[in-house]
Image: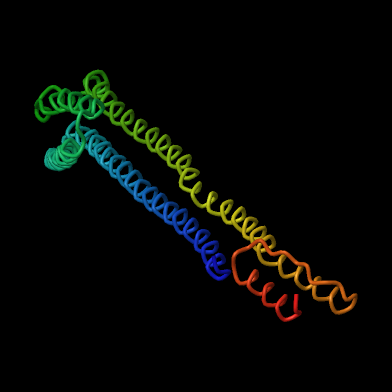
Amino acid sequence: MRIKYKLFAGFLLINIMLVIAGSMSIYELLQLRKKTVTTIDANYIALNRLNTMLKAVESEDRAVLLLLLGQWEDGRNQLSKADSIFRATYLEARSRVKDNTALDNIGNQYIVFKHIWELPIVDTKKQGNLSWYNKTFIPSFRKTTSQIEKAMSYSRSRLHAESKQIFEESYTALMPGIVAIISAILMSLLMYFFISRFFSHPINSMLKGLKDYNTKKKPFRVTINTNDELKELSGEIKKALGE
């Protein structure tokens, strides 16, 4: 094989290995980026919806207090608005998340909670009745907010767990790059051995043989074991020297 082909084959092999490893690293990192964005977006949207529902329930609590104080119009308007916000947000969450026990619990508890404040307050014995508010309304209110807060806590825990998993997967994504570096080092060492064994060593042998011939008049007895230009060069030197 010609020298230039040997060198070309060696460098081509190194480049192929680097391209393959680099391509794998890029692919893994792109997949990891996509997963990271999807995970963060999904959990952020879930937490945002839950926070909206929590604020709606808290707004209903303030509206009930307004009704207890006799502020009928403001209380009713605030109740209606908060209820609409809660139901719209809850239905959106249900349409995007399937088999979510936390959302089921929130929905069931909200039905119970809403039934309490839907009952007449204005112009009834409940108006101004803090005992009813503290003993009946507040416990249901707290159960409802507790269910929402549990769901928020679950979403945060899931975000933490998935983020940790993505962090661990980042090592896997880096592995092809590490392999590429190690492969490049090993191939460089092999190329050094290859060039030294089949290129530098034969040239040094012929150079030493020529020096011995010129200075010490020793016969040119250099044997080249490679079937390439160096062996041809050795043969031509022997012919030129008449050996």
Residue sticking out furthest to the right: 216
- The answer to whether residue 75 of the structure is visible from this angle is no
The relative height of residue 90 versus residue 211 in the rendered view (above or below) is above
Residue 142 position, x and y percent, is 29, 25
Split into 4 quadrants, where in the image is the C terminus? bottom right
- Of 221 and 122, which appears nearest the observer? 221
Residue 184 position, x and y percent, is 57, 56
For this view, does 131 lie left or right of residue 18?
A: left
- Of 139 and 145, which appears nearest the observer? 145
- Of 232 and 127, which appears nearest the observer? 232
Residue at x 32%, y 41% (from the top left corner): 43
- Of 101 and 60, which appears nearest the observer? 101
- The answer to whether residue 187 of the structure is visible from this angle is yes
Residue at x 75%, y 79% (from the top left corner): 242
For this view, does 12 lie left or right of residue 119?
A: right
Residue sticking out furthest to the bottom: 240
Residue sticking out furthest to the front: 242
Residue 228 position, x and y percent, is 59, 68
For this view, does 126 lie left or right of residue 46?
A: left
Q: Answer with the quarter of the image where residue 123 lies.
A: top left
Residue 239 position, x and y percent, is 70, 78
Split into 4 quadrants, where in the image is the N terminus? bottom right
